[in-house]
Amino acid sequence: MRTAFDFSPLYRSSIGFDRVFELLENASRTTTIDNWPPYDIARTGEDDYRITMAVAGFSRDELSMTQERNMLVVSGQKSGEDIGEYLHRGVAGRTFQRRFQLADHVRVTGARLENGLLTIDLKREIPEEMKPRRIEIGSTAATPKVEQRKIEAEKQAA
């Protein structure tokens, strides 16, 4: 059962939230869920995050990571097939592509592959001009005075 939300009433009273509504609409569209490779997302600080992916069997050369605007794409492709006859093959070596939607001002600060785990460090860096700032309130002496005019009505004798 799929429920579609109508965001059109919100468009009338909000400005600049088009991307948020687009994300909500995309999230409601469920596609086939691919849960491989497994991953964890952890918050390691106020503005720091870490993605850990289990990519056993892949080397650094077989993994690639790209960030375009607010999308992080991690993909893996095996370079060649191992020579040998397998009696059982339990380590998955199939090609994958995992996409992560990133919030504004989140960037990748580092990545490392250790013991079959790919760890990606992320940091949210809000530009100075977007951070809250205190605005001083001036005194009334600095405000130019506006001259008030009185309008007098003539009295008419009846």
Image (spheres, rainbow, N blue to C red):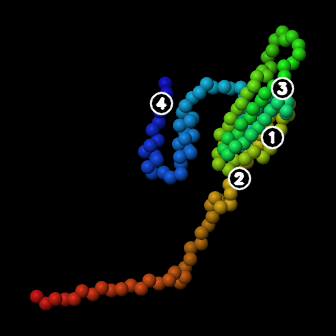
C-alpha separation, residue under disc 4 versus residue under disc 1: 38 Å
- Which quarter of the rendered picture does the C terminus lie within? bottom left
Q: CA distance from mark 2 to mark 4?
A: 35 Å
What mark, if any, has residue 111 been given in the picture? 1
Picture disc at residue 68: none
Where residue 32 appears, as percent x and y from the top left, is 61, 25
Q: Label 1, label 2: how many angstroms apart (C-alpha)?
A: 17 Å
Mark with earlier residue (4, 1): 4
**Residue 61 x, y percent position in the rendering:** 85, 33
Secondary element type, mark 1: strand
Amino acid type, label 1: Ala
Task: Name the residue carrying label 2.
Answer: 125
First in residue order: circle 2 vs circle 3? 3
Among the two numbered marks 3 and 1 on one chain, the one whose residue lies closer to the N terminus? 3
Which residue is label 4 attached to?
Answer: 3
**Foreground pick, 119 / 11:** 11
Mark 1 or 2, nearer chain start? 1
**Marks 3 and 1 in Cβ contact (< 8 Å):** no
Left or right, 70 with respect to 152, comes to: right
Q: Is residue 45 visible?
A: no
